[in-house]
């Protein structure tokens, strides 16, 4: 699955931010997207992966992919 | 107990009862995270927590009477920053300005690590329509007026908050 390229519509860099800012900024950025568009979010907070999974379940915006790239966490989120 | 409206979004009801810098964080962090997940959030600010509704936040922190608080320096090499300085009570209680030094050290440490300021977190909460309710009784006891607090907050009492909390999925006292 990870070899499929996902094309994002918006990139949000939350590098250097700690809880809860990656979640807060993600929520704000998602409001700018239309249904079906994709947000790429980058974070360095080690708490981000479990938090983004929970955020996705709670909001219904699907977490398409969660991965580590250059020691950063990268998330692709589909706006519902 | 079931919610009166099963189709309503999840709801978080918080009581913020402490006004020091360290204890200002948990309610604003939880409220903003819940707001970001699309939950309804209401925070009842009571006793010392009420001062967190002032326009200018002056929340401070002191290691005096706070023995679990790590005392770390926000500058210098990593090994130096990781030292936990033990401060004798005599020093903390008697050196003028000790509390403001401790407060600025904590603020700088938080900033260095990427933690948002209390001001930023409160604004994030307001942007997400978190309800902030100031306690009327505390206002009366400490002699505050409505205009001492931010316009966005409401003023209410225990019954008003409990009615809101009765329909909440998560209720926490901080």
Image (cartoon, coloured by chain):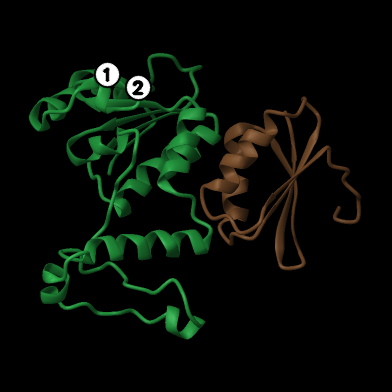
On the same chain, marks 2 and 1? The answer is: yes
* Residue drawn at (19%, 19%) of the image: B159
Q: Quadrant of residue B63?
A: bottom left
Residue at (40% x, 59% y) in the render: B107
Camera-side residue of A26 and B146: B146
Q: Is residue B103 left or right of residue B75?
A: left
Chain ID of residue with mark 1 = B
Q: Is residue B8 visible?
A: yes
Q: Which chain is brown?
A: A
Q: Residues within 10 Å of mark 2 (few under 14, many from 20)?
A: many
- Parent chain of label 2: B
The shade of chain B is green
Residue B118 - label: none
Relative to B43, does residue B105 appear above or below in the rendering? below
Toward the left, the furthest residue is: B141
Helix, strand, or loop for circle 2? loop
Q: Is the residue marked by circle 1 packed among few (<14), some (14-19), or many (20+) residues within 10 Å?
A: few
């Amino acid at each position: 699955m990870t070899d499929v390229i996902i094309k994002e519509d918006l990139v949000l860099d939350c590098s250097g931010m700690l809880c809860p800012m990656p979640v807060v900024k993600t929520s704000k950025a998602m409001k700018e997207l239309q249904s079906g568009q994709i947000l790429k979010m980058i974070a360095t907070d080690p708490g981000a992966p479990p938090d983004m999974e929970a955020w996705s379940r709670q909001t219904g915006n699907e977490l398409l992919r969660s991965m580590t790239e250059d020691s950063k966490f990268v998330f692709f989120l589909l706006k519902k | 107990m079931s919610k009166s409206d099963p189709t309503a979004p999840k709801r978080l009801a918080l009581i913020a009862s402490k006004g020091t810098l360290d204890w200002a964080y948990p309610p604003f962090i939880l409220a903003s995270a819940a707001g970001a997940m699309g939950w309804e959030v209401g925070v009842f600010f009571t006793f010392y927590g009420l001062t967190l509704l002032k326009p200018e936040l002056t929340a401070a922190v002191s290691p005096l009477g706070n023995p679990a608080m790590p005392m770390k320096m926000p500058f210098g090499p990593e090994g130096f920053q990781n030292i936990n300085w033990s401060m004798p009570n005599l020093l903390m209680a008697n050196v003028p300005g000790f509390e403001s030094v401790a407060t600025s050290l904590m603020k700088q440490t938080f900033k260095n690590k990427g933690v948002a300021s209390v001001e930023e977190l409160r604004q994030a909460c307001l942007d997400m329509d978190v309800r902030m309710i100031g306690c009327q009784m505390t206002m009366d006891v400490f002699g505050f007026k409505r205009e001492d607090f931010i316009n966005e907050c409401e003023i209410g009492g225990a019954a008003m908050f409990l009615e809101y909390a009765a329909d909440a999925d998560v209720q926490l006292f901080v």
